Amino acid sequence: MKKSLDAVLAQVGPDFWDTAGIAEALAGAPTRQDVEQQVREHRLLALTTFDGRTIYPTWQLDRGQVLAGLPAVLAAFAGLPAWSVATWLTSAHDALAGRTPVAALTAGRDDETVAALASRTADGWR
């Protein structure tokens, strides 16, 4: 079953920052280039909209810091479509007791479990 664009945006968001917004939200107020470097290093997830804008889901940060465990998950998905990764991160998984990977990472107790699940999923997508 295909999801509508609105459903995907609601699931992955519903709130997003642009590059300036996430730079401001990150502790230490990094530059635009610093944010782009974090994306290249798989520490932040950047999504490109249909009109070419870059947006960042707000759930990636916790009190100005990148959500603990997220970089390992993003590294597992390196080279795969960012929107698919974002949807995976915000979908419930049986292996996480029905929670989303974002919820599991936010709880701070399942970083290794989420990273292992991400690795298995990414291997299956390749």
Image (cartoon, grey):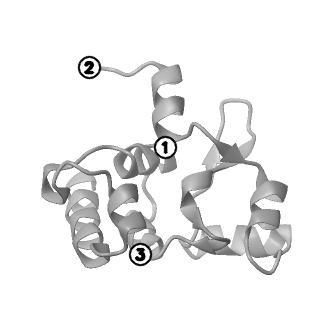
* Residue type at numbered disc 2: Met
In this rendering, position of residue 41 left or right of residue 112: right
Marked residue nearer the N-terminal end (1 or 3): 3
Mark 2: secondary structure? loop
Marks 3,2: beta carbons within 8 A: no
Which residue is labeled 2 in the image? 1
Residue 69 got which mark?
A: 3
> Of residues 71 and 124, which is closer to you in this image?
71
Mark 1: secondary structure? helix
Which quadrant is the C terminus positioned in? bottom left
Distance between the alpha carbons at the discs numbered 2 and 1: 17 Å
Of labels 1 and 3, the one closer to you: 3
Q: Residue at x 42, y 51 (%)?
A: 85
* Residue type at numbered disc 3: Gly
> Of residues 124 and 118, which is closer to you in this image?
118
**Against 10, is 58 above or below?**
below
Place of residue 21 in the rendered image (x, y in percent of width and height, measured from the top left): 80, 55
Which quadrant is the N terminus positioned in? top left
Distance between the alpha carbons at the discs numbered 1 and 3: 19 Å
Graded by Cα atoms within 10 Å as few (under 14), some (14 to 19) or many (20 or more), the crowding at tag 1 reads some
Q: Splitting the image into 4 quarters, where does residue 40 fall?
A: bottom right
* Residue type at numbered disc 1: Trp
In this rendering, position of residue 34 left or right of residue 10: right
Q: Splitting the image into 4 quarters, where does residue 63 fall?
A: bottom right
Place of residue 6 in the rendered image (x, y in percent of width and height, measured from the top left): 53, 21
Of labels 3 and 2, the one closer to you: 3
Q: Residue at x 41, y 75 (%)?
A: 69
Graded by Cα atoms within 10 Å as few (under 14), some (14 to 19) or many (20 or more), the crowding at tag 3 reads many
**Against 101, is 88 above or below?**
above
Place of residue 29 in the rendered image (x, y in percent of width and height, measured from the top left): 83, 74
Residue 83 got which mark?
A: 1
Mark 3: secondary structure? loop
